[in-house]
Amino acid sequence: MDVTQEFHPGPQSALTPERRSDEHDLIEETARSFVERDVLPRMEALEAGDVGALKALYRKAGELGLIGVDLPEAYGGLELDPLSSLLVAETLGETAGFGVSINIHSGVALHPILYFGDESQRASYLPQLAVSEVIASYALTEPDAGSDAIHGKTSARRDEARGCYVLSGQKQWISNARVVSVYVVFAQLADRGMTAFVVDRDRQGVSVGKEEHKVGIHASPTASLILDDVEVPESALLGAPGHGHRIALSVLNLARHKMALYALGQARRAIRIAAAYAKERRQFGVPIASFGMIREKLGYMAARYFVARSAAYRAAGELAPGKKRALDLALRSDLEPEEKVRGVSSALSSCIAACSLNKVLATEVQAFIIDEAVQIHGGYGYMEDYEIARMYRDARITRIFEGTNEINRLAVVRDLLHARAREASACSSGGSSSPSPAASLSLAAHLPGSRLRSTLEGAEQALRAMRVGFDAVVEAALACEGARLIDQQAIVRRLADAKMWLYAFESSLVRVALAADARGPARDLGAEFAAVAWADAVRYGFTPLLEAARHVGVKLDGLEYPDEIGQLQAIAEYVLDRVR
């Protein structure tokens, strides 16, 4: 069975942070209270490797329901809606290394069992994972297989006489390796290919290497996993033999989106810390928050966070139908294992480009925001006594793991090319593709005459021009390179950046257009955020497209964008007013 991206929400259906109820406020406040009262005061102990403190926090998170927010109730979860899951994930992201650790446990380690395990495996492991009686990890990377993890050398062989599998090899940089009780391990099964297994830590032959000395995320333990002729029962196999690559890649697709939320949590905290410091720090007799360049920094920080957050929440809405279909298939008992794995992995992979581009955008926005926050702190930002210094160290890894940002840029364009091929096939057979949220309907049409309406109208015009230009460049690049285009990485990088900013720009405009009756920055400063998003989309999305266009012989006219100096000052004032 094949499940492609079959859900394209219109403007009125797009998921935004403003689509929230009192219940959403409550779940977010629960997560925030946990972060501020329980986790952050213990960061020194966590950074020092205090395993007891780490496990205690896991148990507390489990008791509060923060690990199983969107896990089915039948397996110990709360089974809440996608927005609740987003709010929790972003808030937990503020805890830096601890956020990485719990993200692994509740994401890439839990999801293979939920979506690809049989009923016995789900019933055995998931309730314990939901409350952190058991902590789990995901073992894919190897010393010689990082970005190319699918071709790892860890082996599995079937022992017919003893009715088990025997695993041997070494996994590298495994988050939570020394604190977990169960690993999801990927190994090459003789004559079948990559296969996934659930391996309990107490199995003979399982050992863990020394703790890695990382630059950052010290609160997230990392070590190698060594498998020395480890015997696991037949019941340990996940999915179907030879289908581990489908499990690994589809679960990583979800993990990339979740990584975007983690990065956004870090970015949001950095903005609050920087704004509070700017109000307190005095130079030349006045708070540095009164200086124009400091305000401009805060304006850009908040505006880019707004754009990246808009894109991540929209993507979650697009992911939701695929995740629901995947779970429905996973729970069926009438499907053969191979058929089930194919269907579930296809459903979970329905938004590859959106997940990859969100991971890239959010982590690069995170890097920009935290770097600027350090700059606002001046010399103090480089001192380990200040939280922002730790955040600076912790932020660097997010552009590397869950697929480097270079690998994810390749994934964006590869998925784009596959989608174009599918659309061409559908058109030739009488089918049609669905429009994107802002493709055929004016977002500003329902608004009364105002500065917001005029800004949105100008931004939409720029968006349409970018989209037309993008299609023209892709067509020309395909005409020049054909199937070899994906190997022309300099062009691919520029196309990926253009696609990323098209998606993010459109997401921001949709969010602003829907916020008239909401509360928060999308309503209060809609025109300002739309204007800066417009300017950034031209700077970081259209400019690379112009470079690619010149290379493939396409003539594109430049795009103008509005004056943003006043807009940035207004955004900075808004941020400073709300930080205490």
Image (cartoon, helix red, strand yellow):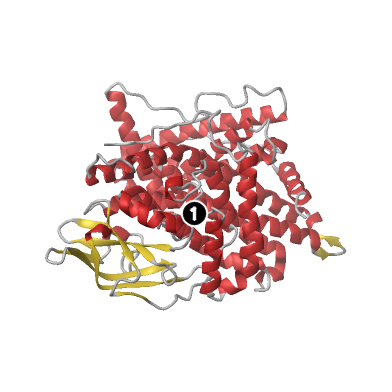
Question: In this orientation, does residue 313 appear?
Answer: yes
Question: In this orientation, does residue 490 appear?
Answer: no
In the orientation shown, which residue stands out farthest toward the left?
161
For the point 47% across and 31% down, the residue is 436
Dot 1: few (<14), some (14–19), or many (≥20) neighbours within 10 Å? many
Q: Which quadrant of the structure image shows residue 414?
A: top left
Instruction: Give the total number of marks visible in the rendering.
Output: 1
Judge whether 76 appears above or below 11 on screen: below
Q: Quickly name the residue at label 1.
A: 259
Quadrant into which the C terminus falls: bottom right
Residue placed most toward the observer, 453 or 311: 311
Quadrant into which the N terminus falls: top left
Residue 573 percent across, percent down from the top left: 77, 47
Q: Is residue 130 left or right of residue 346?
A: right
Residue placed most toward the observer, 548 or 301: 301
* Amino acid on which disc 1 is placed: Met
Residue 417 percent across, percent down from the top left: 34, 39
Residue 93 percent across, percent down from the top left: 56, 57
Q: Is residue 65 left or right of residue 297?
A: left
Residue 362 percent across, percent down from the top left: 53, 51
